[in-house]
Image (spheres, helix red, strand yellow):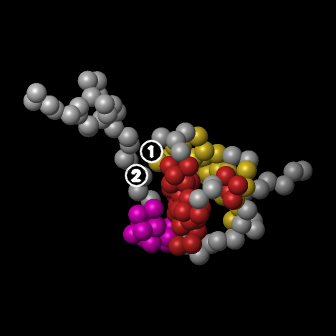
């Protein structure tokens, strides 16, 4: 009979990115879209953002993380993964909720790009006015 591995899952979103995150006991391996996270994220800041909930919970190296991310850029994807990981940690241990909430990691950042309006070069920018 096959051994069943227990894992936790959650979804995180930021801007136009959506991350489906799974977490299970392991050695700290992080795989994003079937690629190691060091190869996937070029910037150190994106790697740091993604790991923030684990650092706060003092759980770095205890869990293997598997994430599938779609849409947006790398910054939004890192934020989406962070929200997914934070939600999983709260599911696993409700005592972490207070610390994660205080750090702002359980709140979905709802800011989106404002659409461009017709008759203007951008969302808010107007053409330069010239009297003559």
Asked whether, in this view, residue 121 is left or right of residue 65, the answer is left
Quadrant of the image for the C terminus?
A: top left
Is 108 above or below relative to 52?
Answer: above
Residue that extends furthest to the left in the rendered view of this protein? 131
Magenta residues span 93-105
View extreme (bottom): residue: 58
Residue in view at x 26 percent, y 24 percent: 119
Q: Dot 1, crowdedness within 10 Å: few (<14), some or many (≥20)? A: some
Q: Nearer the viewer, residue 8 or 71?
A: 71
**In the rendered image, which residue does mark 1 sit on?**
15
For the residues labelled 1 and 2, the Cα–Cα distance comes to: 8 Å
Say which mark, if any, is on residue 45. Answer: none
Report the residue at 69% width, 65% height from top.
63
What kind of element bears circle 2? Answer: loop
Q: Which residue is mark 2?
A: 109
Closer-to-camera residue (88/28): 28
Q: Check the image and report above or below for 9 versus 60.
A: above
Q: Nearer the viewer, residue 46 or 68?
A: 46
Residue 113 location, x and y as percent?
38, 40
Is residue 3 magenta-colored? no
Query: Does residue 28 appear in this view?
Result: yes
Secondary element under disc 1, as helix, strand or loop, is loop
Given contact means CB atoms under 8 Å apart, are the residues at marks 1 and 2 in contact? yes
């Amino acid at each position: 009979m096959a051994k069943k591995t227990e894992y936790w899952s959650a979804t995180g979103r930021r801007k136009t990115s959506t991350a489906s995150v799974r977490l299970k006991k392991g050695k700290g391996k992080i795989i994003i879209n079937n690629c190691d996270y060091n190869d996937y994220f070029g910037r150190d800041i994106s790697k740091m953002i993604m790991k923030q909930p684990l650092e706060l919970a003092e759980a770095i190296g205890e869990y293997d993380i598997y994430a599938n991310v779609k849409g947006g850029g790398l910054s939004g994807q890192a934020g989406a993964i962070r929200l997914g990981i934070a939600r999983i940690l709260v599911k696993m241990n409700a005592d972490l909720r207070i610390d994660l909430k205080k750090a702002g990691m359980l709140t979905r950042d709802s800011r989106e790009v404002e659409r461009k309006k017709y008759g203007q070069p951008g969302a808010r920018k107007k053409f330069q006015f010239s009297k003559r």
